[in-house]
Image: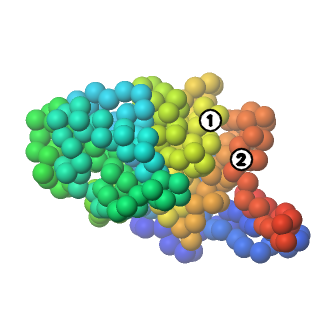
Amino acid sequence: MTSMVSVSQFVNLAALSRAGKVESVHQGVAAVTRPDGVIIDALGDATASIFPRSAVKPLQVVAMRRAGMKLTGAKLAITAGSHQGTPEHIQLVLEILASVGLDDSALQCPVAWPASPEARKSASAETTLAFNCSGKHAGFLAACIESGWDTKSYLDPSHPLQVLVKQVLEEYSGEDIELSTVDGCGAPLHTITPAGLARAFGTLAKSEPEISAAMLNNAWAVGGQNSPDKIVMQEGIVAKLGAEGVFALGLAAGPNAGAGVAVKIADGALRAAPLVAIKLLKKHQMISGASYSRLETALAVESMGGGHVLGHLTAL
């Protein structure tokens, strides 16, 4: 039996410098798995459980598709996404619901303002459609309709769809789920280890080409224009962020197809996790130098002083 990750199991993963001195440090845990699922690198205790939050959405989509969901392209991508509530995002969600004869009244996620600053300016009220998980919830509902399952109780842990989600998580991670609770959107949330999350993402990236392609070709539907998972996916790497500093990625093609990386930042800040993840890819020669350089630049966090750059956040 694994335990939840504790303070003593975290290690330093990234540091922010200012004028040549370390100003802030992010601790956490991380894991790298090769295509056969074997752990080849661990920072901190990668076998202690974490809450993966929205990083597991693409795995939930596997369950939706097994239940009969037939979405493709951007509509499939947004079911795996944490969108920004833009008009384009909301339109996709509405189209998914309409395709199975439902409307937004069927959504059981909380209400929210759009995360996109531009969309927020024109919003007049919080809505379920603007909640970042509404695409996933629309996918849940579409799967229920296709399988003839109840749509009123689709978030209940005993609902056939949620039972299937749990089975997929255990299958892809190679682990038994030991603790379940409720995620921010109201859906069941299950623990997983960083190693299990890395293994699951590598497996998904390689063995679910339609999901991988939908995410890579419609990365804007998975996140926002500047979200770190969208930035990483521009390099052909399947990626998904989660709340509280979780970031996972999987390689869909090439000699390392099926390899995965998962990072959990102890303080819950996301800014360090993508940099740590790509640094681990570089360490194990799973990414080209040019691709790494582009990502490092795009994901850079700068320490500013008087309009000048005085340092950077660096993965250790």
- What's the residue at 62%, 41% (across, down)? 232
Cα distance in 3D space between marks 2 and 1: 11 Å
Residue 146 or 182: which is nearer the viewer? 146
Quadrant including the N terminus: bottom left
The colour scheme is rainbow
Q: Quadrant of residue 302?
A: bottom right
- Above or below, 241 relative to 209: below
- Above or below, 34 relative to 272: above
At mark 1, the secondary structure is loop
| Residue 302 appears left or right of 261 | right
Say whether residue 301 is visible: yes
Closer to the chain start, of discs 2 and 1, is 1
Q: Pinpoint residue 61: horizontal percent, then vertical percent.
A: 34, 39
Count of numbered tags = 2
| Residue 134 appears left or right of 248 | left
| Residue 189 appears left or right of 204 | left
Location of mark 2 (residue): 298
Say whether residue 316 is visible: no
The amino acid type of the residue labelled 2 equals Ala
At mark 2, the secondary structure is helix
The amino acid type of the residue labelled 1 equals Gln
Please tell me how crowded label 1 is: few (under 14), some (14-19), or many (20+) other residues with Cα within 10 Å: some
| Residue 277 appears left or right of 221 | right
Q: Pinpoint residue 70: horizontal percent, then vertical percent.
A: 28, 27
- What's the residue at 72%, 73% (across, down)? 24
Q: Which mark is residue 234?
A: 1
